[in-house]
Amino acid sequence: MNSGSTGPFDVLVVGGGPAGLSAATRVVECGKHVAIVDDNLTLGGQIWRGSPRGNPGLVDLFEPLRQSLSKLAVLSGTRVFDHPAPGVLLAEQADDVCALRYDKLILATGARERFLPFPGWTLPKVMGAGGLQAMVKSGLPIEGKRVVVAGTGPLLLAVASYLKRHGAQVVLICEQASWSALAAFGLRLIGFRQKIKEALELQGKIAGIPFAANTWPVAALGSSKLESVTISRGGKTSQIACDYLACGFHLVPNTELPLLLGCELENDNVKVDEFQETTVPGIFCAGEPLGIGGVESAIVEGAIAGLTACGQKPSGDSDLFRARRKARRFARLMERTFALRRELKDLPTTNTVVCRCEDVTYARLKQHSSWRAGKLHTRCGMGPCQGRVCGPATKFLFDWNPDSVRPPIFPARVESLATSRNGT
Amino acid sequence: MPSPVELTVNGKPVTVPAEATVAVAMMIAGVACRTSVSGEPRSALCGMGICFECRVVINGLPHCRSCQILCQPGMDVRANE
């Protein structure tokens, strides 16, 4: 294994999704030296995963960057796991460990799906909604497969539409939110012209796919892989045969790295000032870690962070601030609409696995009063995902709050950890 | 159009589309990625590298997140036991 050091960069951006690309674009425009580091194989984040084809938003943001490659370093397939000293992050690549040095840091770490446990959710072919979409984008043949899309949030519609376009037979979209919540959401969209356009386009694309509100999965059934799913719809249960269950309950922010760096959170989101600066001077944050807001807020917040990191603070009456206010209003509206119903807390039964890394069941966890107690007694959250899946689940089920974050924030090789100790 | 990639999964030959990830190869081969601590078969859940359910052994190296790694010709992939 090799180890090395790169930088110092004027600005290091962690995360190559909309917020990170937008930030990097502004930094390049300011004539500064910037690097984007991303765990995934390609830039674009989860929303624009893969090639720019069919992703005009990615092309818009990426093209200006492509023309300034001399000012830009892109480190894909590179995952940050430690922060050994001020101005340095440590990251692992396929065979290397690398120290990334920076003057200013912009965190654009995005979000992940929230998964909730129910009987059978650990069966192969029960996947996240975004998870199945990512797999299809990575080459999984889906043509002719029967898929149930379930959970909550706008992602379900986008995923269903994508899968249908690729030949899947989407049997049903199960949205746990009530019709009344969705109707109120629809009415309030009137303040968001762009969103109405998107909604109508999407409606055209999902035409022909059955959609049910007040509906959620109760159990996934099958011997070694998924065969059918039991759903609760309007108080009645029924069974649907399917090849895949794509199930995600909206998104949760990735706040592990901000926490490791000492950034404060507020209501589980990274706290920033009006210029996107966190409570740690010189460290900025943009996009989903500030609360799930979608691509518009990510792009505008990335721009403000990028400019400010270069010492070019936008002025108070800037269009950027107006755009951000509007995008954040939309975020709050989404949060209300897709709030989780309490019936979902009753889905796990005694033997349902909650922590998938350590196979800790609901019954074992229920005996404990906090995340820490559960962790110490059952190893819940101590496996390789480090609570990224069971943390948000136990927060919903038991109101537990995960405790402090410690390095490495991702499992790292022993050799990498040795580098970390040597204080590279 | 780049040509398909041939590799082996649990010793059996599998052909996957160009630029498919190893997690996709496991799905096409119809085998689980790993066996959990209590013996359950598990496969990719998140598809984006955070859940670690899709861990496999690639060319002898264990605990590789198969959703984050592209298939290469001749790769030897095995379930993570």
Image (cartoon, rainbow, N blue to C red):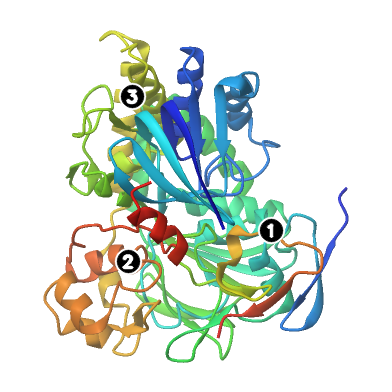
> Element type at marker 2?
loop
Task: Give the total of numbered labels.
Answer: 3
Q: Residues within 10 Å of mark 1 (few under 14, many from 20)?
A: some
Crowding at mark 3 (Cα within 10 Å: few <14, some 14-19, many 20+): many
| Disc 1 from disc 2: Cα separation | 26 Å
Name the chain letter of the residue that bears numbered label 3. A
- For the question of whether residue A152 can be seen, the reply is no
Q: CA distance from mark 2 to mark 3?
A: 31 Å
- Quarter of the rendering containing residue A327: top left
Neighbour tally class for label 2: few under 14, some 14-19, many 20 plus, Cα within 10 Å:
many
Instruction: Name the residue beneath numbered marker 1.
Output: B70
Which corner quadrant of the image does residue A417 belong to? bottom left
Q: Chain of mark 1?
A: B
Image side of residue A262 versus residue A237, left or right: left
- Horizontal side of A12 relative to A142 (left or right) equals left
Q: Is residue A228 visible?
A: yes
Residue located 34% across and 21% down the image: A309
Residue type at mark 3: give it.
Arg
Task: Please identify, in this view, whether the residue under mark 3 or under mark 1 is nearer the observer.
Answer: 1
Nearer to us in this view, B73 or A206: B73
What amino acid does circle 2 point to? Gly
Circle 1: residue type? Leu
- Quickly name the residue at label 3: A324
Quadrant of the frame with the C terminus of chain B: bottom right
Q: Share a chain, discs 2 and 3? A: yes
Local SS, label 1: loop
Are the residues flagged by discs 1 and 2 in contact, CB closer than 8 Å?
Answer: no
- Chain under label 2? A
